Image (tube, rainbow, N blue to C red):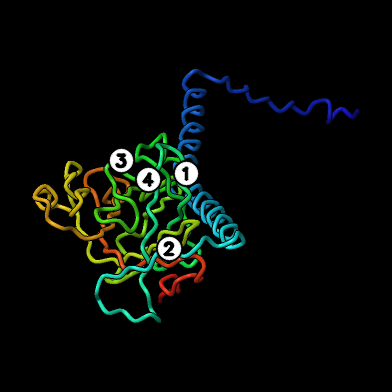
Amino acid sequence: MTDATAAAPRRARRPRRRATVTSVLGELLLTAGVVVLLYVAWQMWIGDVIMSAAANDKGQSVSAQWAKDPAPALPPVIDDGSGVDGAHPQYAPPVMTAPQNGVPWGAQMHVPRWGSDYNVTIAGGVTRPDTLDHGWIGVYPVSAMPGQVGNFSMAAHRTTWGKPFNQVDRLRLNDAIVIETEQGWYTYRFRTLEYVTPDSVDVLDPVPQEPDTAAAGAPGGRYITLTACSPLYSLAERIVAYGVFESFQPRALGAPASLKAVS
């Protein structure tokens, strides 16, 4: 070691900063904020995409299995005096048993307007923990059954948990809403859309919003009603889509034309 080196002053070391309670708390809060943001992103977008795709894949598997099974016998032909020729008979819709709360029903919903792969399970009940938060479409306890006189009424999430009814506001006049079962396909046609307050339970009436019609014993039609929260990410209102029954297609005759993709 030379004298010059020995004489060189040593570089002073910077004192190490000690972690304070405030700095540690700040870092913890920052980390928690990132975790919350990631969770929200998962719930609102990423998780929805994954859950929706999984639901549709499962629905496609159910439909594929029904297609492989032997087709049930044809139901009776409706003779309503309308003069429908024998080449285009109308078949009586099979009567389904009401679904149990929180249990998949053996029915799938297809809406070509929402994509050719849209195929979502229908289950009993409309509570979040039992039905809706599983990504299913729920049937109201007061609902009529598919194809029967009355109001076949359902609910589903519009955001989160796969959001089965996310695009309900995109339905157009005469769009098909098809309910598939092991027996065949029940086709309804969309008619109109409206927004109501959460307490407007008359949308579930046998004739929607006309409680006196059924009470008076007047004949009613065959309707379908889809309900969801509105606007997006809010519980302030309900968006309601109405449709009317068109026909039942037995499985033995193959898939109906109503399932064709729309542009």
Disc 4 versus disc 2: nearer the observer = 2
Disc 1 versus disc 4: nearer the observer = 1
Say if mark 4 contacts mark 2, CB within 8 Å: no
Q: Which quadrant would the N terminus be assigned to in this image? A: top right
Disc marking residue 75: 2
SS type, badge 3: loop
Say if mark 3 contacts mark 1, CB within 8 Å: no
> Which quadrant of the structure image shows residue 66?
bottom right
Q: Which residue shows up at 18% across the image and 54% down it?
A: 207
Categorize mark 3 by other alpha carbons within 10 Å: few (<14), some (14-19), many (20+): some
237 left or right, relative to 93: left
Residue that numbered label 4 is attached to: 138
Percent x, y of residue 186? 39, 62
Percent x, y of residue 238? 24, 49
Toward the viewer: 65 or 118?
65
Find the distance from the CA under tag 1 to the CA under tag 4.
Answer: 9 Å
Residue that numbered label 1 is attached to: 104
Q: Could you tell me the amino acid type at mark 3?
A: Pro
Disc 2 versus disc 1: nearer the observer = 2
Q: Which quadrant would the C terminus be assigned to in this image? A: bottom left
SS type, badge 4: strand
> Which quadrant of the structure image shows residue 166?
bottom left
Mark before the other along the chain sequence, 3 or 1: 1
Toward the viewer: 104 or 9?
104
Mark before the other along the chain sequence, 2 or 3: 2
Q: Could you tell me the amino acid type at mark 1?
A: Pro
Residue that numbered label 3 is attached to: 141
Find the distance from the CA under tag 2 to the CA under tag 1.
Answer: 24 Å
Q: Could you tell me the amino acid type at mark 4?
A: Gly
